[in-house]
Image: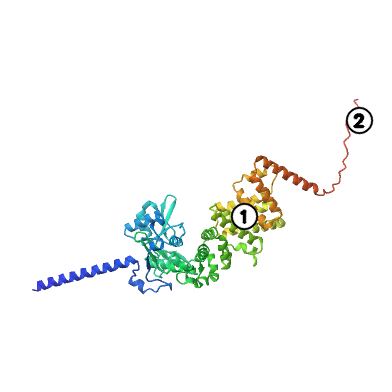
Amino acid sequence: MLFLASSWEQIIFTFIKKFWTKKSDATHAQKDEVNISVSPNEMEQKPRHNQRSKSAHIHDARQYGIYPDKIHKHALQIVDKLQANGFEAYIVGGCLRDILQNKKPKDFDVATNARPEQIRHIFQRQCRLVGKRFRLAHIMFGRDFIEVATFRADHQPKHNDNQSRQSASGMLLRDNVYGNMSQDAARRDFTVNSFYYDPNKHKLYDFFNGLEDLRNGKLRLIGNPEIRYQEDPVRMLRAIRFMAKLDMFLDSPSETPIRRLAHLLQDIPPARLYDESLKLLQSGHGVKSYRLMRKYGLFEQLFPSLMPFFTERGDNDTQHMIERALSSTDERIADNLAINPAFLFATFFWYPLREKVEILKNEGGLNNHDAYNLASNDILDTFCKRLAAPRRHTSVIRDIWILQLQLMKRQGKAPTRTFEHPKFRAAYDLLAMRAEIEGGESIELATWWYEYQQSNESQRTQLLQRQQRSKGKAHSGEKKPFRRRRHSQRRKSATNKPNKQVN
């Protein structure tokens, strides 16, 4: 009987154990389905961001016009492969925002709970791991790649320096603390960028009411704006870019700290600031981005050396040139024409360069060519200390500036050499903008070069002859200075010389 009782107790115990194990597995599976599982330790930790979402609003993506055929095939392949290997994977970020606004996305990103090393193990040689501050995987497709990021989580004191590190001002120097999808959503910058899409289940996850903000045209930071700007000051520039690009307004809590914290941009590496400046000024909304940066005190953080040339009324040549150049860039982007950042920055610093040249000529006694070379070095060195422009761009900037001198030479073979220079067209465009701002001789010079470009060989010869005659008339109209004739002793002719007598 004791044996039977013991056996029955064992059977009942085994049954109860199996029952609770199945129930527990089902519960975990359900939590994984909506990706809001939280460990006991995480529940005890106080969230740093005051807008942390506990659950996502899950929508049928098809009701919002999001279908797999609107996602790049390479991004879909990555999601499929990660999910086939047992990981979560979603299309994330700005591409979903663009689709929701009926725009064509340019970039497609993927987020997953797979660690970078696990991603590399799955994709093998197709995968490249990049970045120390923010470890990412680039999945290569020829020359193109799709960026794959592992879910991030909040930073805690227990994390080591390889995972989490902050500067004294609060800027994140390492951001490699991994978490789940809800934690990752809280680490994103704006509510309209915190969407997650599963193309296989047609589910759209919205953790922070981003759909509502998108409908209302509101740009809102996730969490405490001051802390988020301190963690990454570039978020202030991103706010400007999204306001200009998406035609949205920044809500008051996100807007208030910007001017006060603008100086934090000085801690950002110059190479990263240069890339961000291109995104702002060459996005097709350059004029609006420039004016917003001026409004919030951010432009002077990127271009401090231009500030001495600015006035409060904005009525000087430098400010007129910047607005004209940005307007031209916006027009070219709208017309799907090529743009070059070197040209844009050559226009920005043209009048500061001219002033520097005059100082070197007057105080240093240098000729025009040497003064231009020395001034170019000085201007570009100062510029690159804040925005690290690559050499391939600074060399083009120099060419555009030096060609302004060559455009003034319109005699002999000089026009042909200038016209055949690879950067002639960019130099001429700068001349045309100068003509709009300066008037006078610049208009005549720009008009002459316009005719030269439109002419054939014989017409160009006539242009040169006409230019030579007009220059000759200008010289003939000038009063020649009086020159005193030098009286030299005339050489006596050989016939007047006395013959030597031969003894």
Horizontally, is 420 left or right of 482 in the view?
A: left
Q: Quadrant of the N terminus?
A: bottom left
Q: Is residue 439 left or right of residue 487?
A: left
State the residue position of label 1: 377
Image x and y of residue 210, in percent: 43, 67
Mark 1, secondary structure of its residue = helix
Q: Position of residue 86 (x, y in %)?
A: 31, 59
Q: Nearer the viewer, residue 178 or 496?
A: 178
**Numbered mark located on residue 498 in the image:** 2
Between 298 and 328, the one nearer to me in the picture = 328
Q: Secondary structure at mark 2?
A: loop
Q: Residue 413, position in %: x, y?
A: 67, 42
Three-letter amino acid code of the residue under disc 1? Asn
Sequence order check: which comes first, mark 1 or mark 2? 1
Asked which quadrant contains residue 159, the reply is bottom left
Outermost residue to the left: 1
| 69 versus 16 height, above or below | above
